[in-house]
Image: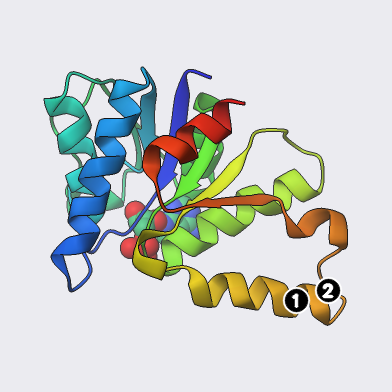
């Protein structure tokens, strides 16, 4: 495994613990010799993540649609910034460049990107691991909803465990590499 694609908020959340956790995650990535692929923005947790990986000497590839270069403030200091034509190309490029997917706290965009890669995994379109970095129980309600989808017959037993869940970044990255 060389690079991890991270989906996370273009906002920072309303508590410092989210930014602190993203810094810990960035440190774990660099310490395990892994590169980062992400949405290329300098806003919110996305910016915190990229800044920290770069500050620690890690590799960061950003992928941003032209339309969002100003809106999300494209990061000017990345190892590589790939400007694409739209959201679909963004996700396809991020997926092609990475060997695993991890979601950190975020909003609709983060959930949309995560559920797409999990759906692709379910359909056998890729075999890359998908995980949640569950900072301070942020994703607990989402995990409950997955159990509800399974209990009501909409998520099959063999797909229920597609998402690996960890609250420790080192353990999470070690699990992805196994
Ligand atoms: P959010 O979690 O809503 O703050 O969004 C996080 C990131 O996901 C932002 O960079 C959004 O631009 C991005 N995003 C939202 N929807 C999509 C989409 N359909 N395809 C690709 N990226 C998206």
Left or right, residue 88 beside residue 162: left
**Label 2, residues with CA under 10 Å away: few <14, some 14-19, many ≥20:** few
In the image, what residue occupies the spot 22% across and 30% down? 53
Placement of 157 over or under 38, stated as above or below: below
Q: CA distance from mark 1 to mark 2?
A: 5 Å
In the image, what residue occupies the spot 70% across and 50% down? 162
Residue highlighted by disc 2: 154
Q: Where residue 13 appears, x then y in whole percent?
A: 23, 69
Placement of 36 over or under 109, stated as above or below: above
In the image, what residue occupies the spot 38% across and 42% down? 169
Left or right, residue 37 beside residue 172: left
Name the residue nearer the viewer: 136 or 65. Answer: 136
Give residue 42's mark: none
Q: Is residue 44 visible?
A: no
Quadrant position of residue 28: top left
**Label 1, residues with CA under 10 Å away: few <14, some 14-19, many ≥20:** some
Mark 1 vs 2, N-terminal side: 1
Asked if disc 1 and disc 2 are in contact, CB closer than 8 Å, the reply is: yes
Q: Is mark 1 within 8 Å of ligand 1?
A: no
In the image, what residue occupies the spot 36% across and 60% down? 135
Quadrant of ligand 1: it is bottom left
Looking at the rendered structure, the secondary structure element under dot 2 is loop
**Quadrant location of the C terminus in the rendered image:** top right
Name the residue nearer the viewer: 168 or 95. Answer: 168
Placement of 7 over or under 75, stated as above or below: below
Residue highlighted by disc 1: 149
């Amino acid at each position: 495994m060389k690079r991890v694609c991270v989906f996370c908020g273009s906002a920072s959340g309303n508590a410092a613990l989210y930014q602190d956790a993203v810094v810990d995650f960035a440190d774990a990535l660099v310490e395990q010799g892994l590169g980062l692929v992400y949405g290329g923005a300098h806003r919110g947790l996305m910016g915190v993540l990229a800044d920290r990986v770069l500050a620690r000497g890690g590799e960061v590839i950003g992928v941003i649609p032209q339309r969002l270069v100003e809106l999300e403030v494209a990061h000017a200091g990345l190892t590589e910034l790939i400007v694409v034509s739209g959201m679909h190309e963004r996700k396809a490029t991020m997926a092609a460049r990475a060997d695993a997917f991890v979601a950190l706290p975020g909003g609709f965009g983060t959930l949309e990107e995560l559920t797409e890669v999990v759906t692709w995994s379910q359909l056998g379109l890729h075999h890359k691991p998908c995980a949640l970095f569950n900072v301070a129980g942020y994703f607990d309600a989402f995990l409950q909803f997955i159990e509800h989808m399974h209990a009501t017959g909409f998520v099959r037993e063999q797909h229920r465990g597609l998402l690996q869940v960890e609250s420790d970044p080192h353990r999470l990255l070690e699990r992805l590499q196994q």
